[in-house]
Every structure is written in structure tokens, then in C-alpha cells.
Amino acid sequence: MIRMEQRTLGRTGRDVSVVGQGTWQLGGDWGEVREADAFGVLDAAVESGVTFFDTADVYGDGRSEQIIGRYLRDRPDADVFVATKTGRRAEQLPDNYVLDNFRTWNDRSRANLGVDTLDLVQLHCPPTAVYSSDAVYDALDTLVAEQRVAAYAVSVETCAEALTAIARPGVASVQIILNPFRLKPLEEVLPAAVDAGVGIIARVPLASGLLSGRYTADTVFAPEDHRAYNRHGEAFDQGETFSGIDYATGVAAAAEFAGLAPEGATPAGTALRWIIQQPGVTAVIPGARSVEQARANASAAALPPLPQSTLDAVRDLYDRRIRAEVHPRW
């Protein structure tokens, strides 16, 4: 196995690889993925030095968790920290975020993953009011006391939600959308997380594949792929698809971003390297549907830091092409 840089994931006290493996794709929500192919992706990630998997109980209605559980039972030598998410199995009302539901969802995730204690459970982008609820954090503390979970965290849609969660002493980490097309978390969220000792997990790092440079205005996505049916937030938060950017705008900006890749680096690797070197980021969690993608994602950890000229160019691109569209919403 390749040795990858490790960073401490906030208040968990556990070290994880700077490039993790996002597993939303393995649930089937980006198009069908055979189980053998899913195992191949996870194996390629582990062999490339990845020690961090991120999943959720609703990815493929639990299929992603189940695949991870079966894979890790077959690979007892793989020292992988698994973060899952909870809360999206019920109507999105603050009143549903209660201890009884947490226990029910927790039982299901532990069974799917085949473990007695979850490494980390994250609230899965709940209603904004949930982040301010004392009762919710009391319930999460109870899960820890009952040894159902080792630690808890949050996944958020907005910077305001992130800042509210960071102020809570039991929150181990915050998962937030961060990529060269989504810079707002750099302003307040990352500095606040550093000050509080809270980890930052960067999701949607390639803006749903836009930053790979592989898509054009004529690209057609499968009907079951959220990039086909959720461009305007029809099924869930719009920010989860192309970082909330209009597709045509994103394709044009991605073509310009591709020109910023250093010699020997791909646009996707450049985007991941950009995230890794942002102060406060613990790990970035790109997804993959093939062995080649998993290996390529992991290789970004070995790229040299981007020079200041490239960082400045990313900021300029964002200001010119993205800010006016994204900031009114986010």
C-alpha cells in the first residue's frame, strides 16, 4: 500500500488520509454500479493510501454502507475510518431529529456496516433549526455514552450552519461543499474550525465532475444520475449538483480552469490539490465509479503544492465567472 499524508480529523483524535473516498456513487445514485466494480473502487483507494471512507444511510437506501461493510470484512488489514450520515430517512422536520429516531437509524447503519460502534456519524444536512437545538446534541451525546458511535459531526449546506455547529463542544468535524468554484467557506468557516479544533471534510470537490474537464455543453447524463434530474434542486439541495452552478456556466468555467493545471497534473488532480492545501482542511472526499478514477483521485495527494500564481488565478476565475451567480444563494 502507498503511504499517504494523514491529518487528525478534528475532535475525533483519529488520523485520516488527506484524500478520502466518497461513496455516494456506489449506492447507485449516479447510475448503476455493479458490486464487483464497487469493491474494485474501494480496493484501488486503499491500495493508493486512502484510510477514510465517507458514506450515508440513504446512499442507495443503505447499499453504499452494505458494500463498505462487506469490503472491510474481506480486508481486515485495511485500517479505514468510516464516516456515515444520518437523518434523511424521515421527513425533513426538526421534530424528527430525536433520540428514538437516532437509535433506529443508528441500528440500521451499524447492521449495514457490520460494526458495534460507528467511527463517526454526521447529521445529514438537516433543517437549519436542528443545528441550534440543545436536545439534538444531548441525543447525540447519548449515542456516544451508549457506545453506539465514537464521535458525531455535521454535514451542512451553508456557512452559517457550519459556524453554528463549530461552536458546539461535541462536534468533531464539519462536512461542507468546497472546491475552486465554491470559495465562500474560506472566509469564515475554515478559520473558525482551525480555532476550535474542528475537522473540515470537503465534499463535492470536483463540482459533480465539472472540474474534471471531461464534460461539454452536449454531455448527456443517465436519467437516474442526479446531474440529470437535480440541476435546479428538484430532489434535494441544488448545491449538491454542480455546486449549484448553472451547467453552461460551469462548463465554460471548467474549460478555463483546465488551463491552470500544472504540467503533469490533470484538471481534477489540480482541483483536489487546491483543496488539500487550504488551511483547515482535513480531508477531501471525491467519488469514483472506476478503479482508474479512484487511483487518480488518490494521486492528487502526491502532487506538489500549487504556486501562489495558480492560487491567484483560481481566485480570479471564481470572481469573474462564478461569484455573481453563486453568492446570491450561498
Image (cartoon, rainbow, N blue to C red):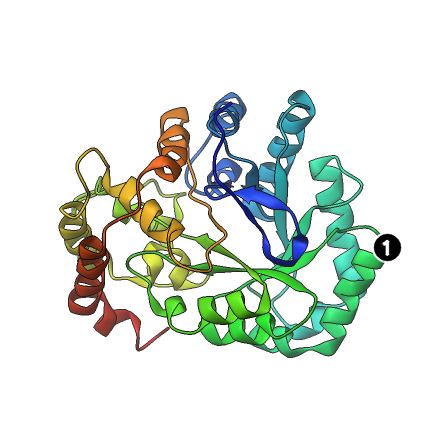
Q: Which three-letter amino acid code belongs to the residue tagged 1?
A: Glu
What residue is rendered at 17% in x and 64% in y? 316
Q: Secondary structure at mark 1?
A: loop
269 and 293: which one is in front? 269
- Determine whether, in the image, residue 70 is placed left or right of residue 307: right
What residue is rendered at 82% in x and 62% in y? 142
Q: Badge 1 is on which residue?
A: 146
Q: Residue furthest right?
A: 146
102 and 234: which one is in front? 102
What residue is rendered at 36% in x and 26% in y? 292
- Determine whether, in the image, residue 96 is placed left or right of residue 269: right
229 and 156: which one is in front? 156
- The crowding category of the residue bearing disc 1, from other C-alpha atoms within 10 Å (few below 14, some 14 to 19, many at least 20), is few
Residue 277 x %, y %: 37, 52
Q: How many marks?
A: 1
- Determine whether, in the image, residue 79 is placed left or right of residue 135: left
Displayed quadrant of residue 294: top left
90 and 194: which one is in front? 194
Residue 264 x %, y %: 20, 33
Residue 38 x %, y %: 50, 28
What residue is rendered at 20% in x and 69% in y? 319
Q: Considering only vertical position in the picture, is 58 above or below 27?
A: below
Visible in this render: residue 57?
Answer: no
Dividing the image into 4 quarters, which one contains the C terminus? bottom left
Residue 18 x %, y %: 47, 44
Visible in this render: residue 30?
Answer: yes
